[in-house]
Amino acid sequence: MLKISQQDNAEPDIDFAVDLGLNLDASQSLLNFCGCIIDLQKHTIQKGQNTVHLRCKLWELFIALATNPNHPLKREVLIQMIWAGNKYTGERALTHSVCHLRQQLKKLTVPLEIKTLPKKGYLLRQNR
């Protein structure tokens, strides 16, 4: 579950967070998630001294999965949310983005994995 922390003078990525059902205001930009600090303003994930910056679509994918932990998200839903329903671009981009996001999470050695549900979608869960 995402937990919200406060940071002074922060301007988080409110539009996308609101689309996903997060209730944020401009004073809330840090989230604590599975031992990581998620910075909504900088689009970064930090664990200890290690930080990764995620580009726009990768960031949106991570937030979509993180706001629905242990709940599968259909490929079509993710494509609609992140690529505005562009199935042609979205299909390949989603597959590539999931692979790249897995690599970024592995760099941080976070206890999270993105599970592929064949022909269905993806879910984010903690490693056991």
Image (tube, helix red, strand yellow):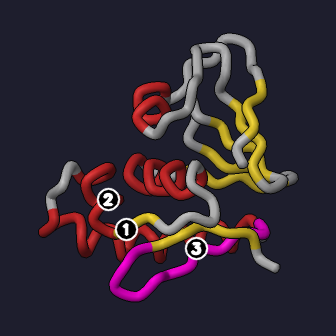
**Element under label 2?**
helix
Distance from disc 2 to disc 1, alpha carbons, whole Å, reads 5 Å
- Vertical placement of 49 versus 128: above or below? above
**Element under label 1?**
strand
- Whole-percent x, y for residue 126 in the image: 74, 69
User: Residue placed farthest to the bottom in the image?
Assistant: 118
Q: What residue appears at the point 66 percent right and 11 percent down from the top-left corner?
A: 9
- Vertical placement of 83 versus 7: above or below? below
Q: Quadrant of residue 118?
A: bottom left
Query: In the displayed structure, does residue 26 sit left or right of residue 32?
Result: left
Query: Residue at label 2?
Result: 77
- Looking at the rendered structure, which numbered label has been put on residue 74? 1
Q: Which residues are magenta?
A: 110-121
Residue 114 part of the magenta-drawn span? yes
User: Residue placed farthest to the front in the image?
Assistant: 71
Residue type for callout 2: Val
